[in-house]
Image (cartoon, grey):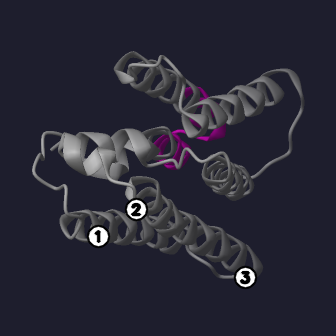
Amino acid sequence: MGTLLTFSAFLAFTAANWAVGADAAMVAGLVVSFALLLRNWNRDARREPAVFDLSVFLLFSVLALYDGFGEPLWSATGVQVRVEAGILLAIFGAMLAGRPATLPAVRELLSQPGRADAGFIALNNVLSAAWACAFAVMIAGELLGQSLPDSDPLTSSLVTLGMLSCAECFCRWYVERHPGRGHHGAD
């Protein structure tokens, strides 16, 4: 599964948003982000929640509360853009905190010596930057789609799938070139 697992809350949100609508999508994103937060917290020996996981959980919590108690007039695309922008900010925030979004997933992909390498955080910054680029393109695609009168929602979905696939493929390719790639237990 690789680094794609890191973004599983977004995947759950996107699938639910497309299939049943924004209300259920917020709940799906919230539930999966909570499960991922717990999973990674239980795997971290220091018991520190990952900055990214916590940020995504807070994003979905706030959006779900606002959706439940407020009266948002967001379209499905409007909600999608807000979530994508929130995740993009969470990626940057995690990088600035020195705990890039991809840390938990890459720890599972690399052997212990690879994780101890001085370049481990730098490796994760590159991978997180790749995901940031993917989310930036998704946001641009959503906004462009909104501005075109005859845009098809399927096109937006294809852009999203394409960007997720490209980011995951790049991350796998990049990690394969890292010297500590002796363990591949996360697949």
Mark 1 and mark 2: span between their CA atoms?
8 Å
Q: Residue at x 40, y 23 (%)?
A: 44
> What are the residue bounds of the magenta stretch?
13-27
Amino acid at pointer 3: Pro
Q: What element does badge 2 sit on?
A: helix
Q: Residue at x 35, y 22 (%)?
A: 43
Magenta: main secondary structure equals helix
- Image coords of residue 29 (percent x, y): 55, 33
Q: Nearer the viewer, residue 159 or 7?
A: 7
Mark toward the start of the polypeptide (1 vs 2):
2
Circle on res. 100: none
Circle on res. 123: 2
Mark toward the start of the polypeptide (3 vs 1):
3
Mark 2 and mark 3: span between their CA atoms?
41 Å
Q: Nearer the viewer, mark 2 or mark 3?
A: 2
Q: What element does badge 3 sit on?
A: loop
Amino acid at pointer 2: Leu
Q: Nearer the viewer, residue 186 or 136?
A: 186
Task: Tell whether label 2 touches label 1 (CB within 8 Å).
Answer: yes
Q: Residue furthest right?
A: 71
Q: Residue at x 58, y 75 (%)?
A: 137
The residue to which callout 3 is attached is 149
Position above or below: 20 against 170: above
Q: Nearer the viewer, mark 1 or mark 2?
A: 2
Mark toward the start of the polypeptide (2 vs 3):
2
Report which quarter residue 140 is drawn in. Answer: bottom right
Binning the other alpha carbons within 10 Å of mark 3 as few (below 14), some (14 to 19) or many (20 upward) gives: few
The residue to which callout 1 is attached is 174
Q: Nearer the viewer, residue 69 or 48?
A: 48
